[in-house]
Image (cartoon, rainbow, N blue to C red):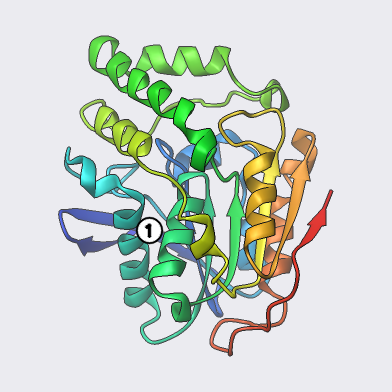
Amino acid sequence: MPASQTLDVPHARLAYRSTGTGPLAVYAHGALSSRDHERRSGFLDWSPIAAAGLRLVEYDARGHGESTGRAVEADYAYPALADDFRALCDHLAPGERVHAVGSSMGAATVLHAALAEPERFDRLVLAMPGVAWQARESRREGLRAAARTVEQQGKASLVTAMRLGRPPILADTDFPPVFDVPDSLMPTVLRAAAADDLPDPEALRQLPHPTLVLAWDTDPSHPVATAEALAELLPDARVHVSRDLADIRTWGARAAEHLAGQGRAGAPAAATAPGRHLR
């Protein structure tokens, strides 16, 4: 496995790993996770992107995995994480358009980055987008309660609670095996997530990028409804919903196929078209 490299950004050092060659695709993981955490989960494998003739860069968000961070809530707001994402793109491929891939928190990061600098990106993949907009209000208190639990009892208690409440589609997995955020930073990350949301729906209608949305069912924190709403809002999007673990394991290949389509990085953006829904 290639060694990690680092990039200094304001108040943090991001660790990343690059595999493959070709146009750049950058992947952002979910909250409390990391590159290694996802690898241990056994079902989120993005290596087919590199095998498809792209340069895949996976990085640890600030405060996660091998990346550093500080206990300042604003540092983990989605727009701030999007600034890190764009800084990494600028470092790796200055002046070039790149593909953007993200799951959960990473999907929100990608959308905020694309809105901040739409001309910077070519194709998007959004996996497991979290509960959003009006439906997110009930989720916010749960995240704040999780932050208090970590402060009072440590993160092991939260791991236990989440294993008991894992979505049925993940019943045969050890998800989540661990959280890859220091105890000292977890409450800050959780409170930042409680305060955050996906971009305004009307703003999303302006994004021209060909987009693949990947969702799994039976998970109220990452509901199919959010994925379907994104596919309706984004001008050129399609959604695939997985109903079992075997199908989730096809996501890497599906993402690779999408990114290898017309409108490759470095080329003009593809023309928009009405959203399509896949099952």
Give the camera-side residue of 7 and 131.
131
Residue that appears at 23% across and 48% down: 75
210 in relation to 104, above or below: below
Seen at 72% across and 42% down, the residue is: 248
Q: Is residue 144 visible?
A: yes
Residue 126 placement (x, y as % from top left) = 59, 55
Q: Quarter-wise, where is residue 183 in the image?
A: top left
Describe residue 33's horizontal placement relative to residue 250 as left or right.
left
Mark 1, other Cα within 10 Å: few <14 / some 14–19 / many ≥20:
many
Q: Is residue 238 left or right of residue 31?
A: right
Give the SS element for disc 1.
Answer: strand
- Left or right? Give the position of 148 relative to 17: left
Residue 25 % position (x, y): 53, 69
Percent x, y of residue 165: 57, 16
Query: The residue under label 1 is which amino acid type?
Result: Tyr
- From the top left corner, tell me how far across and down residue 198 is, in percent: 47, 50
Q: Residue at x 17, y 41 (%)?
A: 72
User: Residue drawn 68% across and 70% down?
Assistant: 236
Residue found farthest to the right: 279
- Residue that badge 1 annotates: 16
Residue 68 appears in the picture as rendered: no
- Give the total number of marks visible in the rendering: 1
